[in-house]
Amino acid sequence: MRHRKKLIEVALPLDAINKASVREGYIYRGNPSALHKWWAQRPLAAARAVIFAQMVDDPSANPDLFPTEKAQEKERKRLFRIIEDLVKWENTTNEAVLQKARDEIWQSWRRACVENADHPRAKELFNRHKLPGFHDPFAGGGTLPLEAQRLGLEAYTSDLNPVAVLITKAMIEIPPRFAGQPPVNPKACREKPLIAKQWKGAQGLAEDVRYYGRWLRDEAEKRIGHLYPKIEITAEMAKERPDLKPLVGQKLTVIAWLWARTVKSPNPAFAHVDVPLASTFMLSTKAGKEVYVEPVIKDGGYHFTVKVGKPKDSEAAKLGTTAGKRSAFRCLMSGVPVTYDHIRDEAKAGRMGARLMATVVQGQHRRGYLTPTADHETAAHNAKPEWKPEVEFFPQALGFRVGNYGMTKWSDLFTSRQLVALTTFSDLVRKARELVRRDAQAAGLPDGIALSEGGSGAIAYADAISVYLAFAVDKYAMYGNSLVPWYSKESRPSMLFSQQVLSMVWDYTEINPFSAIGGAFAKSVAIVADSLEGLPKDPPRAEVAQQNAGVGARARAHLVSTDPPYYDNVGYADLSDFFYVWLRRTLASVFPDLFATLTTPKAEELVATPGRHGGNEKAEVFFLDGMRQVMHRLTEQVHPAFPTTIYYAFRQSESRGDQRRTSTGWETFLEAVIGAGFSISGTWPMRTERAGRMRDSGSNALASSIVLV
Ligand SMILES: C[S@@+](CC[C@H](N)C(=O)[O-])C[C@H]1O[C@@H](n2cnc3c(N)ncnc32)[C@H](O)[C@@H]1O
């Protein structure tokens, strides 16, 4: 077989790819990557460009067409322009741009087929009417197979992790089953403009996710809305706060409650007082819109008042009750240090509590902060969940920093009101599934078989909608837990997993899931539905399986582009249990095989977790052996006409003299690749992470490379 050099083996327009990749990280609306959280998701733009350049001939491979270097260079520039258009965010679903790229791929493919017509395995390897399939055994959030699908390839992909498998299914396997179908909800079947609309790709699915998402939200509000009382602004309140005067008599929706965790004071004189661990008293630091909390010590106890304007002692307000690194906090009542040891002991003894510091309300034009009231504190504490995910997590998991503070089970990450909300939403997803099935039948779909069995009728459609609704619940869960800080610079909640860690948050935000704040349920539904609109309009079929990359034998003669785990950077399986425990409740009957176990599989996960493998050295051996095995399998699975691309990222500190990490990360990976029989023909540096996205607090950003084999 004659090997034709592919563009990626010679040149790439790196600047354009990197720029588009970084930009894409800031776009949420209509971005398929926003369908569900996965860690270290690759940008779609980079994935698309790499697969294209892997499949298209470099002009030097066609000397008959481009005999001189000058002609080759000119042709390369033309191909570059195609890539430059292809990576632009605006062109993600631009059929004209995509078709141009697909045409190039087909042209190169047909040339290879003609040239290899007499190959002994020509029938299997060089079918000029069918592009080779695509394979990625580390699918994760599905980015690489999605982009292969967008470029016209059937994708056969897998991951060990059931949550990753579900996300990838939701991205590339489920939508083609219902592509181009109209929504089934009664409104869409009744209203003329919706009946007349031409539904492309996953637009019908997206419309139904919006409709049933709204139904679910409203039903949940009927059941548990009373747990989120409004606040009436009284004349009394306005006495202290003239800014509230225009609002007197109005009942305002609380969008968030801001809590400070508490422990008993270590000072024996105040041992009965639950003192706050407040990392700051500043609620809003926006210039000219400063708001802060002032603790008032009275009658052997304290309460909080919310003040508008710059605090007299800005430094003290900024510090809250913190007292520097060693002594952690100070007792609000007496000033004595509240050490981490004391906090840990209190937490483990079950004596960590929480006090409401402020409520955030939505006024007509802006957000406001109010002094907490006792009834609001009581409303939160009165919530009694009927169920909770009492599943233990692995305290030594990579990036888990909450185990020392009495948190051992996933349910410990939530307040009781959050548990009530998540349980209610999850149960309603199951109800929604029944409703969708009835509506789909009424809309004329035959019942058919389940989605997990390959169905595409009413039952499968209801299964599919329930997957996307469960994703909206997961999205809310990222804000609806007690590890969410308040971002005082922008007066909004942050969210869990902005880094791949579980860190303790001393003063946390509890959002109102029925309000209009970011992370609330309606917003989560909108993001999920919108992200479906960014999927390909006419996708070829795809298959996604749960499989260990080291043993799976799915692929043969496939184009391979893959993105394995980076040594010890992300503990995917441990982190993903945060979602798994909720998804299992809602979707175990939709995908029984994916949710058969209590938690996600860990033992075979190719991540060098010292806590799991018995120390650093054993973890390294496990990673090297496992990666070598996977790479060996890949050598059997790749199509001989194409180079394989493997993404790899490593901490920048590795290349800055941290010798141990260098050898264990990047070099161990390269060793596995070569040991498996691949030969490395080049690497491309990629700037594919959004600034700050992959930062482990205090450590270094990841640098990425594409390794060509
Ligand atoms: C870097 S991530 C892939 C990210 C993906 N490219 C994306 O853009 O979202 C690596 C993936 O490898 C998976 N993984 C780890 N060990 C595995 C194994 N033994 N077999 C298959 N998948 C594994 C993890 O679950 C994770 O999803």
Image (cartoon, rainbow, N blue to C red):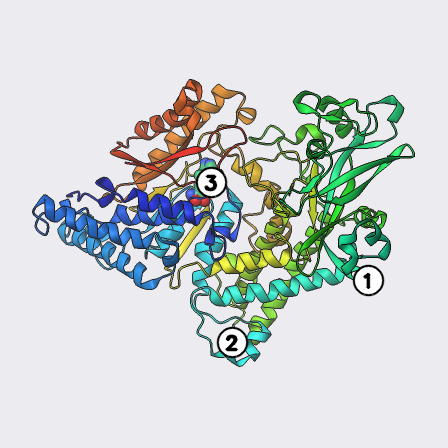
Residue at disc 1, secondary structure: loop
Amino acid beneath label 2: Leu
- Determine whether, in the image, residue 337 is placed left or right of residue 205: right
Horizontal and vertical percent position of residue 441: 56, 73
Give the amino acid type for the residue marked by disc 3 in the picture: Ala
Which quadrant would residue 392 be assigned to in this image?
top right
The residue positioned 21% from the left and 44% from the top of the image is 6
Question: Camera-side residue: 585 or 571?
Answer: 571
Which numbered disc flags the more N-terminal residue, 2 or 1? 2
The image quarter containing residue 631 is: top left
Contact between marks 3 and 1 (CB within 8 A): the answer is: no
Ligand 1 under 8 Å from disc 3 Cβ:
yes
Q: Secondary structure at mark 3?
A: loop
**In the rendered view, does 452 fall on the left or right side of 255?**
left
User: Which sits in the foreground, 360 or 114?
Assistant: 360
Question: What residue is shown with label 3?
Answer: 40
Q: Which residue is mark 1?
A: 249
